[in-house]
Amino acid sequence: MLGLLCAVLVGHGPLPEDAQAAIRASIQRGLASLEATADLKGGWLRGTDEPVGRPPEIPIAVSALVLKGVAQFDRKLLEQPAFQNARGLIDQALREDGAFEGGLVTNYVTSCVVSALAVIEGAEDPRVQGGVAWLKAAQWDSAEGHTAESNWYGGAGYGKHQRPDLSNTQTMLDALRDAGVPPEDEAFQRAVAFITRAQNRSESNPASWSGDDGGFVYTPAGEGESKVESEAGSLRSYGSMTYAGFKSLLYAGLDVEDPRVKAALEWLRRHWTLDENPGLGDQGYYYYLHVMSRALRAFGQDSITDNSGKDHDWRRELAERLLALQEPDGSWVNRNSDRWLEGESCLATAYAVLALEEVMASGVTASPSEMLPEPKAAPEESD
């Protein structure tokens, strides 16, 4: 059995070398599993028969997520044939208008590719700048006849001129941030209006469905929508969207003293968990861990205090959880829910690798001396 043990030491400072080594080994195994499962034509999820309801351009987005993880870990790995082929898939998707071919999900695909290319080629790369310009133009604003009071203003949907939602909006903002767009840019400031209207906080959100728990829902567009069953008179907040809203407000330059940020943080403290995506259970679990990692890195604190007053070293706990869930072949997969493609190991593995890289990039820890668990052993073969 391969042992990956990590002693997490007391005190503040750089992540201890042994902790870094364990996390690096886990990431390396994850990337090796992705390399081994890549399609010969380039990328992942490129089967000949697309499942009903899956846009055929999704492999471009998944490939971009993978390549970002590869580049952040070791740029030399990009020279491997599997990753070179994936880069070719992305290169072929570039459109004259600066977007990357995504059909009905062009905003999502372009956001993922811009984030990846910003790491691989740098923010000044013409393809990055072209993608940024397209994403800004695709954001709902006055050009489409919307004012700041509109439920659509400042948001982004799966494609240009599609209904906006917080998931696509936060992915778009991730791309802008990765590409070096500053918080004071109009795109971030427009997004604040949309994000505010997706929050269950009646003092800042006048919508009739708004509650006061401080969490976030999927979209305020129309009469609003959550991905969990509605309670009478309100839309229920859930974990991944609350981290998405919290993170996006921080990316737009708001601080923890802003009442919207403070309310979101209180929701996250009340619902702190690494066992599930609060409100959705196992659905979207690896997406949840990824957005959590980016949000808490943006938060900039070593720990988060839950509702009972217990401090959680989020880096240690997140790394522990992901190492414990890693499969014997180095991959991750959501075995309890295949919603949003997390039953596909390539996507779950990409999210897990990116989350671990956020842990590494955040760089400090403050927790007792404990050991990260060994990964799962490969099952013994039976006759």
Image (spheres, rainbow, N blue to C red):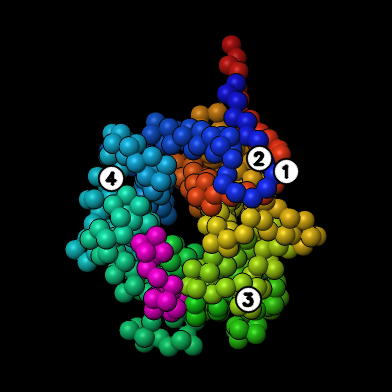
From this viewpoint, is residue 61 visible?
yes
* Left/right of residue 168 with respect to residue 265 in the rendered view: left
Tell me if I can see residue 342 in this picture.
no
Viewer-side residue, 77 vs 156: 77
Range covered by the magenta-colored residues? 175-191
Which residue corresponds to mark 3?
A: 257
263 shown above or below 102: below
Q: In what element is the residue under mark 1? A: loop
Residue that badge 4 annotates: 87
Dot label at residue 165: none
Point out the residue furthest to the top here: 383
Residue with the mark numbered 2: 8
Q: State which tag comes first along the sequence, 3 or 1.
A: 3
Closest to the observer: 129 or 122?
122
Name the residue type under label 1.
Answer: Pro
Residue 368 bears which disc, if any? 1
